[in-house]
Image (cartoon, grey):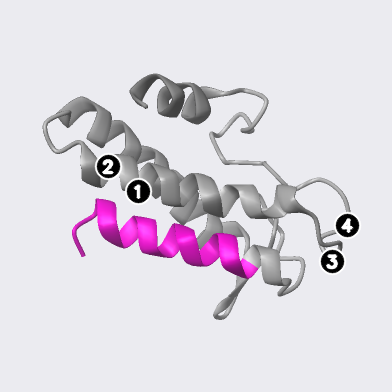
């Protein structure tokens, strides 16, 4: 699990140069496809890995930092009031269901890793 999580968080194919997750960001945001849900699935999986590995301090710190980058990108670049876009690099492109679901998973993951 640690190796898979590390590989996913460091994949240059899944992130831009600032480390913002770009999975599902290509194409028309109104089109329903599974790629737009992958960000949320990844956030939930990393949150779960964080919770299940209390003894792996460095691993947990990496996950916390990673989720915080995604959380900040979501709020800073891809939100409009209390709705969120599909592409976390921005700009906000509309309140499509897949974007809202991925945002929800990210918001919850940020709560988990920051002990809020």
State whether the magenta stretch is mostly helix, strand or loop: helix
Residues at marks 4 and 2, CA–CA distance in whole angstroms: 33 Å
Q: Quadrant of the rendered structure where residue 50 is?
A: top left
Residues at marks 1 and 2, CA–CA distance in whole angstroms: 5 Å
Would you name the residue on which mark 2 appears?
Answer: 50
Would you name the residue on which mark 1 appears?
Answer: 47
Q: Residue shown at 53%/34% (left/top)? A: 19
Q: Are marks 3 and 4 in contact (CB under 8 Å)?
A: yes
Residues at marks 1 and 3, CA–CA distance in whole angstroms: 27 Å
Q: Residue shown at 49%/67% (left/top)? A: 104
**Residue 28 - label:** 4
- Can I make out residue 88 in this image? no
Please, which residue is most extreme toward the bottom here? 81
Q: Decide if residue 85 is on the left or right side of residue 11.
A: right
Q: Which residues are magenta?
A: 100-116
89 falls in the magenta region = no
Q: Quadrant of the rendered structure where residue 3 is?
A: top left
Q: Quadrant where the N terminus lies?
A: top left
**Residue 96 - label:** none
């Amino acid at each position: 699990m640690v190796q898979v999580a590390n590989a996913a968080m460091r994949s240059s194919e899944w992130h831009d140069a600032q480390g913002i997750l770009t999975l599902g960001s290509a194409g028309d945001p109104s089109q329903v496809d599974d790629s737009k849900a992958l960000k949320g699935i990844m956030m939930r999986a990393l949150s779960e890995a964080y919770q299940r590995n209390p003894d792996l301090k460095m691993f947990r710190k990496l996950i916390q930092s990673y989720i915080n980058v995604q959380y900040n990108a979501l709020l800073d670049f891809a939100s409009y009031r209390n709705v969120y876009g599909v592409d976390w690099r921005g700009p906000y492109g509309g309140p499509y269901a897949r974007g809202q679901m991925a945002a929800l998973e990210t918001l919850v993951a940020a709560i988990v890793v920051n002990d809020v």
